[in-house]
Image: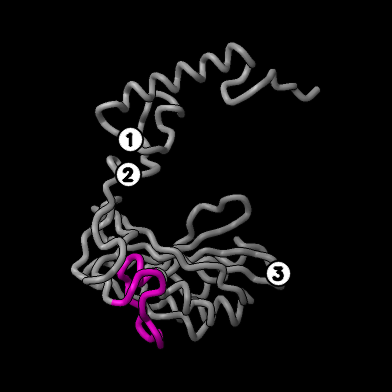
């Protein structure tokens, strides 16, 4: 069985609830219209299509759009070697999906991480609590409206409870910069950012002229 064939079988089983997304490099993704059916679809994918390994569950914050959350289930069949992704959406107002821990036990960790970082709940999970942040932390750090420097918490005695003075933040990029060097992730201070960028570009130009390549000694030998 191939990944596109698995997508076709899901479509045949669940009809209009399944819409196929473009295939990429031999791997298929499908979109599930009703998030409440995700556990039922996953049971079928494991039992009938032999996707016996849950690689990961990831979540996307479609900030500014509705529905806000997209949850993606990455499946693999260890016997046939195919991979399949099942995507489904859930609104911010609801923010609840059925747990698939009864299908794959490893969903335990994945669902807890999504709950911890995004605030999405999984109904039926037997132990839905934070896995990275401390108990009682009031925010969800991977939401797009969560500031890069963090937020101050009101929990006494907890380390890192104040925003970090990052002066622009670590690994900040400039979208749409004039070059890859200008977009390079780094700490940015507005008062000196343009001077630092120009200095880096000049240095790359000097290396290019001296060695034939902007990132180190050269010249680079071309394969014959």
Q: Earlier in the sequence, mark 3 or mark 2?
A: 3
The quadrant in which residue 97 appears is bottom left
Return the residue nearer the eye: 62 or 8.
62
Give the Cα separation between the discs numbered 1 and 3: 48 Å
**Principal secondary structure, stretch drawn in magenta:** loop
* Sequence-earlier tag: 1 or 3: 3
- Front residue of 159 and 72: 159
Q: Which residue is mark 1?
A: 188
* Vertical placement of residue 88 versus 64, above or below: below
Give the magenta part as a residue range. Answer: 114-135
Who's the residue at 48% across and 66% down the image? Answer: 86
Viewer-closest of 84 and 60? 60
Give residue 129's mark.
none
What is the secondary structure assignment of the residue under circle 1? loop
- The spot of residue 220 in percent (x, y) is 70, 22
Q: Position of residue 104 (x, y in %)?
A: 54, 80
Residue 181 position by quadrant = top left
Local crowd size for mark 1, using a 10 Å CA cut-off: few (<14), some (14–19), many (≥20):
many
- Mark-to-mark CA distance, 1 and 2: 7 Å
How far across and how far down the image is residue 163, in percent?
25, 54
Q: Write the residue at 40% across / 69% down.
A: 132
Find the residue positioned furthest to the right. 224
Question: Are discs 1 and 2 less than 8 Å apart at CB?
Answer: yes
The C terminus lies in which quarter of the figure?
Answer: top right
Which residue occupies the extreme left position in the image? 154
Q: Secondary structure at mark 2?
A: loop
> Image quarter for residue 150?
bottom left
The label on residue 169 is 2
Camera-near label (3 vs 2) is: 2
> Given contact means CB atoms under 8 Å apart, are the residues at marks 1 and 3 in contact?
no
Q: Which residue is mark 3?
A: 80
């Amino acid at each position: 069985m191939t990944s596109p064939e698995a997508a076709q079988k899901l479509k045949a089983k669940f009809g209009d609830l399944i819409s196929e997304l473009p295939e990429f490099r031999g791997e298929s993704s499908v979109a599930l219209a009703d998030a409440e059916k995700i556990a039922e679809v996953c049971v079928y994918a494991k039992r009938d299509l032999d996707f016996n390994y849950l690689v990961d569950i990831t979540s996307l914050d479609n900030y500014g759009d509705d529905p806000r959350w997209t949850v993606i289930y990455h499946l693999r069949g260890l016997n046939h070697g195919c991979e399949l992704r099942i995507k489904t959406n859930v609104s911010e107002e609801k923010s609840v999906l059925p747990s698939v821990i009864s299908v794959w036990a490893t969903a335990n960790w994945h669902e807890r991480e999504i709950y911890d970082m995004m605030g999405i709940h999984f109904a039926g999970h037997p132990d839905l609590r934070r896995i990275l942040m401390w108990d009682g932390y009031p925010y969800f750090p991977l939401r797009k409206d969560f500031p890069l420097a963090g937020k101050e918490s009101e929990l006494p005695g907890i380390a890192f409870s104040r925003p970090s003075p990052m002066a622009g933040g670590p690994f900040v990029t400039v979208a749409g910069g004039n070059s890859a060097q200008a977009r390079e992730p780094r700490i940015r201070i507005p008062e000196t950012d343009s001077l630092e960028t120009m200095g880096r570009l000049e240095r790359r130009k000097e290396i290019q002229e001296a060695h034939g390549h902007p990132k180190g000694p050269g010249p680079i030998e071309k394969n014959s």
